[in-house]
């Protein structure tokens, strides 16, 4: 069975699993829209709904040092943002 079924996508298909893994690892951006189980509209965009994103030039995606540097910068930025939010609440 392919990724499509009568009522939406087959979430367990190999294609969908690969897409979810790629998005989860940060190698892809996904935009989902449709209806939820209550028939309400949903619209999710991983690029705008993520806590932190950083573009990596396509010629650098296989360079571990660059990915590591961008990842560390992202973690530091998230921690700094969290600290600033706590400071504002005091």
Image (spheres, rainbow, N blue to C red):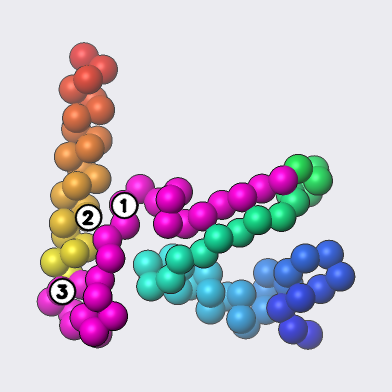
> Relative to residue 30, is residue 62 drawn left or right?
left
Q: Earlier in the sequence, mark 2 or mark 3?
A: 3
Q: Secondary structure at mark 1?
A: loop
Query: Which disc is residue 66 wearing?
Result: 3
Nearest to the observer: residue 56 or residue 5: 56
Nearest to the observer: residue 59 or residue 88: 59
Q: Secondary structure at mark 3?
A: helix
Q: Is residue 14 above or below residue 28?
A: below
What distance separates the C-alpha of mark 2 from that of mark 3? 12 Å
> Relative to residue 37, is residue 55 drawn left or right?
left
Residue at 67% from the left image edge and 74% from the top image edge: 12
Image quarter hosting the C terminus: top left
**Crowding near the residue tagged with mark 3, few <14, some 14–19, many ≥20 C-alpha atoms within 10 Å:** some
Q: Secondary structure at mark 2?
A: helix
Q: Which residue is mark 2?
A: 74
Query: Which disc is residue 52 wearing?
Result: 1
Residue bounds of the magenta highlight: 41-67
Where, by quadrant of the figure, is residue 29 drawn?
bottom left
Answer yes or no: do the residues labelled 2 and 1 have beta carbons within 8 Å? yes
Q: Position of residue 11 (x, y in %)?
A: 68, 69
What distance separates the C-alpha of mark 2 from that of mark 1? 6 Å
Whether the magenta-drawn stretch holds residue 15 is answered as no
Q: From where the camera sits, is residue 61 visible?
A: no
Q: Position of residue 87 (x, y in %)?
A: 18, 22
> Relative to residue 3, is residue 70 drawn left or right?
left
């Amino acid at each position: 069975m392919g990724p499509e079924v009568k009522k939406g996508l087959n979430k367990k298909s190999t294609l969908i699993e690969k897409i979810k893994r790629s998005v989860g690892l940060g190698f892809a951006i996904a935009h989902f829209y449709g209806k939820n189980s209550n028939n309400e509209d949903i619209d999710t965009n991983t690029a705008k709904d993520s806590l932190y994103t950083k573009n990596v030039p396509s010629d650098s995606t296989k360079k571990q040092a660059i990915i590591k540097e961008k990842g560390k910068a992202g973690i530091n930025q998230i921690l700094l943002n969290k600290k600033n939010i706590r400071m504002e609440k005091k």
